[in-house]
């Protein structure tokens, strides 16, 4: 068997370029379109979040960091996507919400006061103990990361303890406080010609010792928040600044069944992805929305309705459940939908929302909607991307417009719109890309020098030095090859 080893090494050298790739399994707590859904509860949840988003900037010019865990009293309408991260030595697993509207990763400390001890989301809550981690270190006031935190968040230092700490108070009355630590974060990584499990890097994150308001409620409790903002304190910025991962991340959120999907620190490749530039110098992922079309017909909307400033614009936010349109755009949008479907569906209202009684598939009678952004990038919405199923009325299905009206301010694209799409946040080139996609399928992922991404039993690879995509071997074969290489390395072969 020894002569077979050079062949394997040569094969892998050709097929697998030098790469860095972090894979995080993504789970959704509950499906969004449950029959018991209450839109007013979702609106209340999102309003609390938007109050914090719209706080804008604080002293020093930094963005407001949103660490709040939010939801409704009904766990089936939480609309929460979360992932698992491993922190500390020995590593401990934490379920943290994926939030593109904030920057910093934080988890609950074991010494936290008034923090929930259980969760109604079907997960076991864990608590971080810096004293029991051999790799943990407290962040001192003189640490450069603490200086950065002071410029970007409500961070301070205790003269007695010389410890970098934070206090966050949110618009809905909830709050959290704690201290910063640096410790190992573990993840699965494809590196060079080997698949390495439990790779690690030292990162800077928060440890919450006190929580109040909605953060204390078990029906919406997770272990913390994973901020995917573009600030220098976010994990994606920390890792990319050390060339551990590329300065880009991607997700694909499943909207059907039990949810789930894909989250990767890297760039998902798909031929249909279109890109649009980010608005510069904004604390959130703000895009230039220019117009809306229904069934290919542009709506009569003053472009000024989508103007961008510190308190206006269009934000992509995975922490918002529904979607929100300024009233200048919302009214013509709903009127156009109603005019198209009123011969096949019965318009009605439910708790202030425009709804329709539909006796057939919504895909057959409701039109496609196009959100048109700068650089010619169009986001095509299927009916399920702007409608919410609210159960039945006299045996007939009721579907309601999931977009909500806001009188002024920010148009927000939440999970209702983002689901069933690949979203690529290319921070290096300051752009966001997207395309409709079945998020139960595998994907191709690339970084600067090449990338493999493992999902659903397939490994695909791309390199910036080549224009072709090579569909790789099944994972069972790859695993066998990796084992052979390891045996060879340790002289067991």
Image: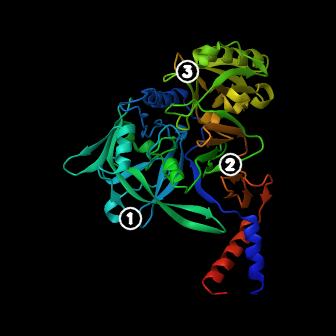
What is the secondary structure assignment of the residue under circle 1?
A: loop
Give coordinates of residue 449: x percent, y percent.
Answer: 67, 56
* Render colour scheme: rainbow
Q: Which mark is residue 358?
A: none
Give coordinates of residue 140: x percent, y percent.
Answer: 30, 52
Q: Is residue 211 visible?
A: no
Q: Residues within 10 Å of mark 1 (few under 14, many from 20)?
A: some
Q: Nearer the viewer, residue 443 or 63?
A: 63
Which label's residue is closer to the chain start, 1 or 3? 1
For the point 57% across and 62% down, the residue is: 188
Q: CA distance from mark 1 to mark 3?
A: 52 Å
Q: Is residue 276 visible?
A: yes
- In this figure, which residue is indicated by the disc labeled 3? 351
Which label's residue is closer to the chain start, 1 or 2? 1
- In this figure, which residue is indicated by the disc labeled 2? 268
Q: In the image as oriented, which residue stretches furthest toward the front?
A: 465
- In this figure, which residue is indicated by the disc labeled 1? 135
């Amino acid at each position: 068997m020894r002569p077979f080893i050079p062949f394997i090494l040569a094969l892998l050298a050709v097929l697998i370029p030098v790469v860095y790739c972090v894979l995080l399994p993504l789970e959704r707590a509950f499906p969004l379109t449950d029959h018991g859904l209450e839109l007013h509860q979702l609106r209340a949840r999102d309003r609390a979040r938007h109050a914090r988003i719209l706080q804008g900037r604080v002293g020093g010019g930094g963005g407001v960091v949103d660490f709040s865990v939010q939801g409704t009293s009904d766990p089936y309408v939480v609309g929460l996507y979360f992932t698992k991260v491993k922190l500390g030595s020995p590593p401990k697993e934490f379920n943290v919400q994926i939030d593109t509207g904030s920057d910093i990763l934080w988890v609950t400390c074991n010494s936290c006061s008034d923090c929930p001890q259980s969760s109604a989301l079907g997960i076991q809550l864990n608590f971080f103990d810096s004293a029991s981690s051999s790799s943990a270190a407290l962040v001192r006031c003189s640490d450069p990361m603490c200086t950065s935190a002071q410029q970007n968040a409500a961070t301070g230092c205790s003269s007695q303890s010389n410890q970098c700490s934070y206090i966050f108070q949110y618009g809905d009355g909830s709050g959290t406080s704690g201290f910063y630590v640096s410790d190992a974060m573990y993840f699965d990584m494809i590196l060079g010609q080997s698949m390495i499990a439990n790779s690690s890097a030292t990162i800077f994150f928060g440890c919450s010792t006190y929580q109040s308001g909605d953060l204390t409620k078990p029906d919406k409790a997770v272990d913390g928040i994973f901020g995917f903002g573009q600030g220098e304190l976010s994990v994606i910025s920390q890792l990319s600044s050390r060339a551990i991962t590329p300065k880009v991340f991607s997700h694909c959120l499943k909207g059907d069944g039990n949810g789930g999907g894909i989250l990767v620190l890297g760039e998902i490749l798909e031929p249909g992805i279109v890109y649009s530039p980010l608005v510069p110098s904004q604390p959130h992922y703000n895009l230039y929305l220019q117009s809306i079309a229904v069934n290919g017909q542009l709506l009569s909307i003053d472009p000024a309705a989508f103007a961008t400033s510190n308190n206006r614009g269009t934000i992509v936010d995975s922490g918002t459940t529904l979607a929100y349109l300024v009233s200048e755009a919302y009214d013509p949008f709903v009127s156009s939908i109603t005019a198209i479907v009123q011969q096949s569906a019965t318009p009605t209202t439910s708790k202030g929302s425009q709804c329709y009684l539909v006796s057939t598939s919504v895909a057959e009678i409701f039109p496609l909607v196009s959100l048109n952004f700068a650089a010619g990038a169009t986001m095509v919405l299927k009916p399920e991307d702007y409608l919410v199923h609210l159960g039945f009325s006299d045996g007939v299905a009721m579907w309601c417009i999931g977009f909500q009206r806001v009188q002024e301010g920010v148009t927000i694209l939440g999970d209702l719109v983002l689901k069933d799409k690949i979203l690529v946040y290319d921070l290096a080139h300051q752009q966001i890309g997207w395309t409709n996609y079945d998020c139960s399928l595998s994907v191709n992922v690339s970084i600067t020098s090449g990338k493999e991404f493992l999902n659903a039993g397939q490994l695909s690879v791309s390199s910036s030095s080549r224009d072709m995509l090579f569909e790789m071997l099944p994972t069972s074969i790859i695993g066998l090859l990796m084992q052979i290489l390891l045996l060879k390395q340790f002289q067991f072969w």
